[in-house]
């Protein structure tokens, strides 16, 4: 079935909002004082992000393609697999969806934000930072994590044995992200998605949080540029080798 651009944009908006709500919601549950999950381990965050991709993929993969990631949208367009005329609308609703999703996370966890004095923990529930303060290490981590994400996403959704059951392929995407967060999440978070980082970072800058601290805009280009570059390379490589 062919869906209108408006319908597909609605799916991208909702999908990206869900990604941020489930992913950053898991981070908030682990890192904010007083929550039932406070102090839990990294695997809880990995599960949150894995399901944050899997659930929108199963809901909207057959409608909009479930990009929910500006880097993927751009990478597909560069390789001629997505219309350039729809790139800006897709990216626009992805970023707005991420902002709305983050606003919902803050609304749900507001009392626990007020209790949390560690400003890096607060920022970590919004956006990514490099754990040793290195932009170079952050870029390397985000590039290779994103490269695996986009190469894997195409490989899974276009695999011949999934073509009669794309729902299973979309389920597998969740396990891919779950594993990426577990394997590559230590240095930066990770971001792997410009909207997932930039939208919430904008909200961090705008919201009057009690213990907000710095939004670290000097680092913000890393989780935007690295995934975009990785997507362009990964999609082009997959297309060259297999399509």
Image (cartoon, helix red, strand yellow):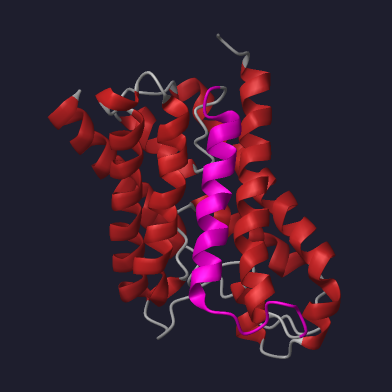
- Residue 81 position (above or below residue 152): above
* The one of 36 and 200 positioned closer to us in this rendering: 36
Quarter that holds the N terminus: top right
Q: Which residues are magenta?
A: 34-62
Q: Residue at x 53, y 36 (%)?
A: 57
Q: Residue at x 61, y 70 (%)?
A: 27
Q: Left or right: where does residue 160 sit relative to residue 3?
A: left
- The quarter holding residue 215 reads bottom right
- Residue 44 position (above or below residue 197): below
- Residue 199 position (above or below residue 161): below
* The one of 127 and 164 positioned closer to us in this rendering: 164
The percent coordinates of residue 150 (x first, y second) are: 34, 44
Quarter that holds the C terminus: top left
| In magenta segment, residue 169 | no
The percent coordinates of residue 28 (x first, y second) are: 67, 72
The percent coordinates of residue 198 (x first, y second) are: 58, 57
| In magenta segment, residue 42 | yes
Q: Left or right: where does residue 58 sit relative to residue 174?
A: right
Q: Left or right: where does residue 189 sit relative to residue 151?
A: right
Q: Residue at x 66, y 37 (%)?
A: 13
- Residue 58 position (above or below residue 164): below
């Amino acid at each position: 079935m062919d869906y209108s651009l408006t319908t597909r944009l609605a799916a991208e908006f909702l999908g990206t909002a869900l990604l941020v709500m489930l992913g950053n919601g898991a981070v908030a549950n682990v890192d904010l004082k007083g929550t039932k999950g406070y102090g839990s381990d990294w695997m809880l965050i990995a599960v949150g992000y894995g399901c944050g991709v899997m659930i929108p993929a199963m809901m909207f993969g057959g409608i909009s393609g479930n990009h929910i990631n500006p880097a993927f949208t751009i990478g597909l367009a560069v390789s001629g697999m997505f219309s350039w005329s729809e790139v800006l609308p897709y990216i626009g609703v992805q970023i707005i969806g991420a902002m709305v999703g983050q606003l919902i996370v803050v609304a749900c966890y507001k009392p626990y934000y007020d209790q949390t004095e560690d400003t890096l923990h607060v920022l970590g529930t919004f956006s990514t930072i490099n754990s040793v303060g290195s932009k170079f290490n952050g870029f390397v981590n985000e590039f290779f994590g994103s490269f695996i994400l986009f190469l894997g996403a195409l490989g899974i959704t276009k695999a011949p044995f999934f073509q009669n059951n794309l729902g299973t392929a979309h389920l597998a995407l969740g396990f891919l992200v779950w594993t990426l967060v577990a394997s590559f999440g230590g240095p930066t978070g990770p971001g792997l998605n410009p909207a997932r980082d930039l939208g919430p970072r904008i909200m961090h800058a705008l919201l009057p949080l009690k213990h907000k601290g710095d939004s670290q805009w000097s680092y913000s280009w890393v989780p935007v540029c690295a995934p975009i570059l990785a997507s362009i390379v990964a999609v082009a490589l997959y297309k060259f080798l297999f399509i």
